[in-house]
Image (cartoon, grey):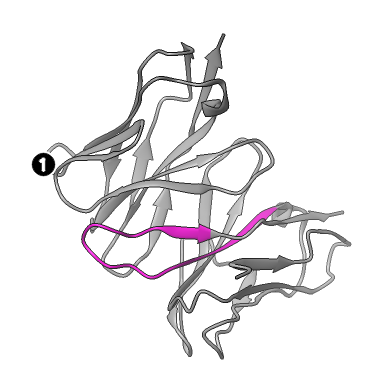
Amino acid sequence: GQSLEQPSEVTAVEGAIVQINCTYQTSGFYGLSWYQQHDGGAPTFLSYNGLDGLEETGRFSSFLSRSDSYGYLLLQELQMKDSASYFCAVNDYGQNFVFGPGTRLSVLP
Amino acid sequence: NAGVTQTPKFRILKIGQSMTLQCTQDMNHNYMYWYRQDPGMGLKLIYYSVGAGITDKGEVPNGYNVSRSTTEDFPLRLELAAPSQTSVYFCATSRPSAPTDNEQFFGPGTRLTVL
């Protein structure tokens, strides 16, 4: 089976940097994804790490360490619109995805 | 392009009733998924399909059935609705190009209440 852990809530101010960690236990690992979901909306894709290291997309970066079963999402220059829930997800070779419980990010003015 | 569409947007069912949640995509993606999301929780994979005629169980398949006769459509069937199936259901697609890209595209969701 697979299980993931994320902090339940994170609070930061506009313009700050925040890091959301994700640890996982899995019987078959292929990659780690991150999704953003605003209240009442559908999840939207942020990034995918299939290899160890850092992936950067604009203000968002994601990191993966397979040896530590650990990854994180880094959000820079926080904006009010970044207030949302963030989910990490792992998938195995067969595209069976398991999502984490989510981290609710609140950005304060 | 419409992307991933789901119907209906909302539905109220009585216990024991049946219904089919529709999911259609025009992205020509091979992979399709059904998730459920309970309030304040993460997404749970119900079933997924890697192509027409091929389906597989996810984490929470009990009480649901799927079929995949075409690339475009991936309906989810609830045979005997139970209050525990009250949830928001999301359909998603992907066309993974490993190992650096595995983006899933989600539909807007169907909010189902079973009373």
Q: If the image is split into quadrants, where does the N terminus of chain A sit? A: bottom left
In the image: residue A41, left or right of residue A4: right
The magenta span reads: B88-105
Taking B28 as reference, is A25 above or below it?
Answer: above
Q: If the image is split into quadrants, where does the C terminus of chain A sit? A: top right
- Give how far across and how far down residue B71 sits, in percent: 51, 85
Residue that appears at 36% across and 30% down: A59
- Give how far across and how far down residue B45 sits, in percent: 50, 59
Chain letter of mark 1 equals A
In the image: residue B37, left or right of residue A54: right
In the image, is residue B101 part of the stretch drawn in magenta? Answer: yes
Q: Amino acid at mark 1?
A: Ser
Residue that appears at 83% across and 68% down: B16
Q: Which residue is mark 1?
A: A67
In terms of depth relative to the viewer, which is nearer, A59 or B39? Answer: A59
Residue that appears at 48% across and 13% down: A14
In the image: residue B70, left or right of residue A5: right
In the image, is residue B68 part of the stretch drawn in magenta? Answer: no
Identify the secondary structure beneath mark 1.
loop
In terms of depth relative to the viewer, which is nearer, B33 or B114? Answer: B33
In terms of depth relative to the viewer, which is nearer, A55 or A33? Answer: A55
In terms of depth relative to the viewer, which is nearer, A86 or B42? Answer: A86
